[in-house]
Image (cartoon, helix red, strand yellow):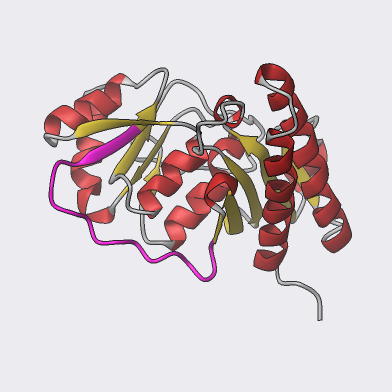
Amino acid sequence: MGLTDVAVASAAARAAAETLLPLRSGGRSGRELGDAGDAAAQRAILAVLNAERPDDVVFSEEAADDARRLDAARVWIVDPLDGTREYSDPARGDWAVHVALWSAGELVTAAVALPAHGQVLVTDPAPALPARPDGPVRIAVSRTRPPAEAEAVAAALDGELVPLGSAGYKTLAVVRGEVDAYVHSGGMYQWDSAAPVAIARAAGLVTCRLDGSPLVYNAPDPSLPDLVVTRPELADRVLAAARSGR
């Protein structure tokens, strides 16, 4: 019996992680290391997908957009190295590997590796959402450009901004209970959020655009520029505040 889709996603994410970690200590640094990591992780993921699901289409940040995906029944949406800047800094662990499967209009399964933490999260079995601790609402934001919408959420909920690295890591920080919400605007692509959003949904989190509309994947335009991921008990207040900050 062959591998299930979630097992394929996990195997592909693990293969990339196992490639990226030793490369990180191989003497390269900066842009050279990031470029090498992107290419090596892409090869590792494709090796698994080509072996296990050769008839499926792959939609990846590190490859030319394959127009066949728009008519395909099954499309793997991949970001081989999410957070190249963080990966290139040996002191940081907030980067990730994304592998998601889209079919019939929906994200159906996914795996996200956090290689620096030795962890791979998948949609099945879904992660258990930890209880929220006492204290201010914690909102994950970009380290370099926290959006005005996130600042509005922090003000409305008497919360605090938590700067973190890659989009995938920030999304999974909500899943892992490190923060309570993630609010992003200002540019993003489908591969930046597909796999982590699938896992967040499986864990029971609310995921949507800043205006509350659904996140649509395998759309013709690869851009998907904004994102909210939040604990369900905070969703109404987070979205209302985010809209007010636009």
Q: Give left or right: position of 200 versus 212.
A: right
Query: Would you say residue 20 sits in the magenta stretch?
Result: no
Q: Nearer the viewer, residue 18 or 63?
A: 18
Q: Considering only vertical position in the picture, is 127 above or below 236?
A: below
On the question of residue 62 being in view, the answer is no
User: Quarter-wise, where is residue 40 in the image?
Assistant: top right
Q: Nearer the viewer, residue 232 or 211?
A: 232
Total label count?
0
Along the viewing direction, whichever of 41 and 211 lies nearer the viewer: 41
Residue drawn at point x = 57 percent, y = 24 percent: 85
Residue projecting furthest to the bottom: 1
**Predominant secondary structure in magenta?**
loop
Q: Residue at x 24, y 23 (%)?
A: 245
Towards the viewer: 172 or 185: 172
Give coordinates of residue 215: x percent, y percent.
48, 42
Q: Residue at x 15, y 41 (%)?
A: 136
Q: Quadrant of the C terminus?
A: top left
Residue 116 pos. (x, y %): 56, 45
Residue 240 position by quadrant? top left
Give the quadrant of the N terminus.
Answer: bottom right
Q: Is residue 216 visible?
A: yes
On the picture, is 202 further left or further right than 48?
Answer: left
Q: Is residue 89 above or below residue 68?
A: above
Residue 145, quarter of the rendered image: top left
Side (left or right) of 10 relative to 71? left
The image position of residue 131, as x and y in percent, is 24, 61
| Residue found at x 60% / y 31% | 87
Q: Which residues are magenta?
A: 122-140
In screen coordinates, is 22 left or right of 240?
right
